[in-house]
Image: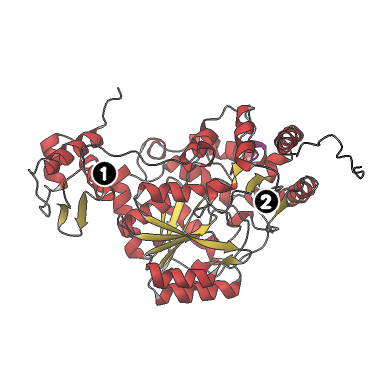
């Protein structure tokens, strides 16, 4: 049996004390420092245990007052219902991350290694290897590298988005950025809106926080604002998470008119918006972004460099109002003590500042444009058509032939060494069963395309009606 971590040990002890009645509902728990002394653990361990119990709904956090019991704990936590593995977000993520390099991944959400700026990354690593001892062995600043934050604020100024570097905090990834914002703003049971379909890990993350998640139909120019307005009035959500540009998986981009209307609705209902900016550099031309229009009044920009530089570096960011940045910085200290590695930040900064990154993006835009055109043509011949023609990026959100059972296709593909991305895994409403996301960069590989076509035809053949004797088309006597 796996040994409990220190955080889990503290959580079990607190659950037992509440369940047994030793800590009554509404009673204040010991301070983080006091409990750390009692257990002999670090304050960050106690803080993490308290925050997890808040997420479970067992404790409540009152700023300036501490943590309070909410009620009796269940000694056994019921298993979370799971959908079929091929369409379960956690299962799909594990398969993609743990797959053998030989496994074909035409449904994955990142570019193949040979599409990334490998030479620039190696050069940056060599430069960082010669850094002083502090950069190589010490903790980084609370908000992350000041130089990288200054560089980001200057880059964003080119899109008329003017903010101070102090309004930027670096994180371990874009997902961690979203997680930190959710922890800071939400409590279990709060309602959150997401695009439908949306990036499936958004749903997985929100499930962990025990939030009520509702989908807003994603159209070719952004969310369906009629439905959005109705949900604002009916459900009073606290948060909306979206990609304004090259939405994942649809590939759509928000129109300027819809961006203004969306912000007006959010302001009237005091709604916070997380704008995931992760695909911005994959767009050949600018799109309507909410953060510059809003000035970070109620929009929080998050993102990372995993799609254009390296997923291995794990460098994300949050841009928000100073008060929220301070809250997130404290939370990042409590749960991880420090932000991203100075080495990681240095590598990212070195690549971004060099001319090689601009040239890399220009080449990437041209290469992806050709790949999209070629793959759309090959898929069209198979009866597979994109719902939206993206202006950039590497994903295609496609309708599959009517006689193709997408779940069966995904299961068969997995059995034969190929990971696909069935539409149902992206949809909160479950209305994407006949859709699939394709990675055009991966689909340019002839072996992947040929294997996919073979799998598709075999699945389709299972649904072809049998031809009975005498059904040759002539009239019967």
Observer able to see residue 297: no
Q: Which of marks 2 and 1 is nearer the N terminus?
A: 1
In-front residue for pair 160/125: 160
User: Image height check: is 17 above or below 364?
Assistant: above
Expressed as whole percent of the image width and height from the top left, the position of residue 336 reads 32, 43
Q: Main secondary structure of the magenta part?
A: loop
34 or 448: nearer the eye?
448
* Residue 23: numbered disc: none
Quarter of the rendering containing residue 462: top right
Residue picked out by circle 1 = 48
User: Are the two marked residues, 2 and 1, in contact with CB atoms closer than 8 angstroms?
Assistant: no
**Bounds of the magenta span?**
105-114
Name the image quarter holding residue 452. Answer: top right
User: Could you tell me which quadrant the C terminus lies in?
Assistant: top right
Q: Quadrant of the N terminus?
A: top left
User: Which residue is pictured at 50% across the width and 40% down the height?
Assistant: 313
**Does the magenta-highlighted stretch encompass residue 403?**
no
Q: Is residue 449 above or below residue 60?
A: above
Position in image of residue 153 (x %, y %): 49, 61
| Res 398 label | 2
- For this orientation, the residue located farthest to the top is 1
- Image side of residue 333 versus residue 130, left or right: left
Residue 8 visible in the displayed image: yes
Q: Residue 158's x, y, as percent?
A: 58, 66
- Tell me the SS state at disc 1: helix
């Amino acid at each position: 049996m796996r040994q409990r971590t220190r955080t889990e040990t503290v959580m079990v002890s607190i659950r037992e004390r509440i369940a047994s009645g030793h800590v009554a509902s509404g009673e204040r728990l010991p301070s983080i420092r006091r409990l750390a002394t009692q257990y002999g653990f670090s304050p960050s361990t106690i803080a993490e245990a308290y925050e997890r119990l808040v997420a479970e709904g067992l404790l409540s956090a009152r700023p300036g007052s501490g943590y309070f019991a909410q009620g009796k704990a269940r000694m056994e936590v019921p298993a979370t219902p799971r959908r079929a593995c091929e369409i379960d977000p956690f299962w799909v993520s594990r398969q993609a991350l743990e797959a053998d390099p030989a496994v074909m991944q035409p449904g994955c959400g990142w570019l193949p290694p040979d599409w990334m700026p490998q030479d620039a990354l190696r050069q940056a690593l060599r430069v960082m290897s010669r850094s002083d001892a502090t950069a190589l062995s010490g903790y980084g600043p609370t908000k992350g590298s000041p130089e990288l934050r200054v560089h980001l604020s200057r880059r964003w100024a080119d899109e008329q988005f003017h903010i101070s570097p102090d309004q930027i905090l670096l994180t371990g990834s874009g997902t961690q950025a979203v997680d930190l914002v959710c922890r800071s703003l939400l409590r279990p049971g709060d309602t959150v809106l997401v695009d439908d379909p949306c990036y499936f890990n958004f749903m997985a993350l929100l499930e962990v926080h025990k939030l009520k998640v509702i989908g807003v139909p994603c159209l070719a120019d952004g969310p369906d604002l009629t439905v959005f307005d109705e949900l604002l009035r009916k459900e009073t959500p606290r948060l909306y998470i979206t990609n304004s540009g090259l939405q994942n998986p649809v590939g759509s981009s928000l129109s300027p008119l819809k961006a203004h209307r969306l912000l007006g609705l959010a302001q009237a209902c005091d709604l916070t918006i997380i704008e995931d900016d992760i695909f911005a550099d994959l767009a050949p031309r600018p799109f309507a972004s909410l953060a510059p229009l809003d000035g970070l009044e109620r929009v929080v920009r998050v993102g990372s460099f995993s799609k254009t530089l390296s997923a291995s570096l794990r460098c994300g960011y949050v841009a928000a109002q100073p008060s929220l940045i301070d809250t997130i910085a404290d939370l990042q200290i409590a749960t991880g003590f420090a932000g991203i590695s100075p080495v990681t930040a240095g590598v990212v900064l070195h690549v971004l500042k060099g001319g090689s990154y601009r040239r890399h993006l220009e080449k990437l835009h041209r290469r992806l444009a050709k790949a999209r055109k070629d793959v759309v043509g090959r898929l069209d011949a198979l009866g597979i058509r994109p719902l939206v023609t993206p202006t950039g990026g590497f994903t295609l959100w496609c309708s599959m032939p009517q006689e193709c059972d997408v779940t069966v296709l995904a299961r068969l593909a997995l059995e034969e060494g190929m990971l696909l991305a069935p539409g149902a895994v992206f949809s909160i409403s479950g209305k994407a069963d006949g859709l699939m996301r394709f990675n055009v960069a991966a689909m340019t590989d002839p072996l992947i395309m040929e294997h996919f076509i073979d799998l598709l035809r075999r699945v389709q053949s299972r649904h072809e009606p049998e031809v009975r004797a005498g059904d040759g088309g002539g009239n019967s006597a």
